[in-house]
Amino acid sequence: MQHVLVTGGAGFIGSNFVRHLLGAREDVQVVTYDLLTYAGSLENLRDLPRPERHRFVKGDVCDRAAVDAVLADHAIDTIVHFAAESHVDRSIAAPGEFIRTNVTGTFTLLEAARAAWRGRDGVRFHHVSTDEVYGSLAPDDPPVVESAAYAPRSPYAASKAASDHLVRAYATTYGLEVTISNCSNNYGPYQFPEKLVPLMIVNGALGKPLPVYGDGKQVRDWLHVEDHCAAILAILERGRPGETYHVGGGNQPTNLEVVEAICQLLDVRYPDAPHAPHRSLVTHVTDRPGHDRRYDLDCTKLERELGWHRRHGLADGLAATVAWYAQSGAWLAAIRDSDDYRRWIALNYGAR
Ligand code: NAD
Ligand code: DAU
């Protein structure tokens, strides 16, 4: 691994991964390839360690000529594929872009890698996927292992499942050296404030309603993004080609418990806010259609085979995340003041 292409590297997890990789390895060159959709920003790539080892190329993963060029121009030997449409609610409102980016984009990247790497050793295509491909679990179901059957239920999850199948097909049919990771809900710095954790932090700090879908008793596993990035690096360095690894946070709170924890952190930070205690802002709203009740991943394989262990518990991870958002006013304001963000908030919450 010397020349690494990170697709979607200007988004939430991708930018954290670029930062993590440059900090951890002094012997790699990193190219971020990103279309800079509403979810991506060069602001997420400020103050990188070893910036002289990083390049940014604006481009679409569906654009075969542009992908061919970036692979050739930078002698890429490793692809870490994050680029995707990633928000379930947007996939319900407008699924088309999810099929284009997540399915056609992954296909285009696989075709380009297959052509560029024909006959080459020492290459790797790592695909970043999600626990949502396995569908919804009942309360007593055991954690899901890597060999479990797929049962996606939202357009987002179905598009990610399709991309996973394509990646495995390229390994089987063409011998492409691939690895896949399926992870749980990430949280941490630079997450776009449309997802649960940053939305609740931002709305709570501003005294706006905290919109909890349905009864709020849905269960997610919450993974700090730095633990996820360390897991991906471990898979790149020590993972076996052709294998899939699960990455999770090892917790199972309900959404209401997560929101309550954020409210308590906001109470400590802003004790004199007119809307304190912040839990008074919690508002139950119409549920998400097809809302998955629970996810839970078994991460034993990653821990035993690659020696990965998470470093963040949910309580300390949320505290650090609330502190990060409190210190990132300019970053947040640029998003909150954008037309796209206003439109999305009105569309998703206006009629709930
Ligand atoms: P994100 O929405 O924050 O970022 C996505 C990035 O991809 C953005 O920078 C965007 O500009 C870029 N992008 C979108 N379409 C593109 C295109 N056509 N060409 C090039 N770039 C494009 O997403 P995220 O939360 O960082 O998720 C990254 C990956 O991890 C996704 O594949 C997602 O499915 C997966 N994942 C995310 C989570 C999570 O909790 N966020 C959990 C499991 C898996
Ligand atoms: O599980 C991994 C997945 O986690 C990733 O693959 C996705 O890219 C990522 O977006 C995330 O999907 P979720 O749908 O689980 O995340 P989200 O933050 O949108 O919602 C988390 C939970 O909170 C979910 O049960 C829905 C609920 N929710 C969400 C929002 C935005 C609310 O109750 N209110 C909200 O306003």
Image: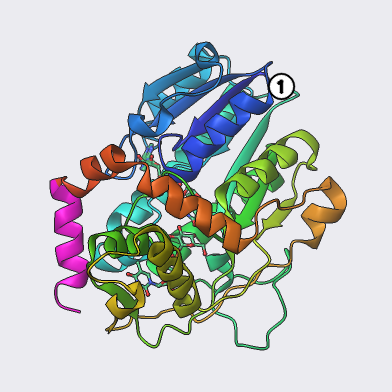
340 within the magenta span = yes
Residue drawn at x 47%, y 85% is: 217
Furthest-right residue in this view: 304
The correct choice, above or below, for 34 with respect to 12 in the image is above
Q: Which of 305 and 261 is in front in this view?
A: 261
Of helix, strand and loop, which one carries label 1? loop
Q: Which of 308 and 302 is in front in this view?
A: 308
Describe residue 179's horizontal placement relative to residue 91 as left or right: right
Report whether residue 53 is seen: yes
Query: What are the residue bounds of the magenta stretch?
Result: 339-352
The correct choice, above or below, for 114 with respect to 285 in the image is above
Q: In which quarter of the image is residue 141?
A: bottom right
Q: Which percent across, then down, holds residue 14? A: 49, 39
Residue type pointed to by label 1:
Arg
Report whether residue 112 is seen: no
Q: Quadrant of residue 313?
A: bottom right
Q: Which percent across, then down, holds residue 80? A: 57, 36
* Main secondary-structure element of the magenta-colored stretch: helix
* Screen quadrant of the C terminus: bottom left
Residue drawn at x 44%, y 42% is: 83
Residue drawn at x 56%, y 49% is: 225
Q: How is the image coloured?
A: rainbow
Report the residue marked by disc 1: 120
Q: Which percent across, then down, holds residue 220? A: 54, 72
Furthest-front residue in this view: 272
142 within the magenta span = no
* Screen quadrant of the N terminus: top right
Residue drawn at x 25%, y 71% is: 275
Q: Which percent across, then down, holds residue 162? A: 51, 58
Q: Nearer the viewer, residue 75 or 200?
A: 200
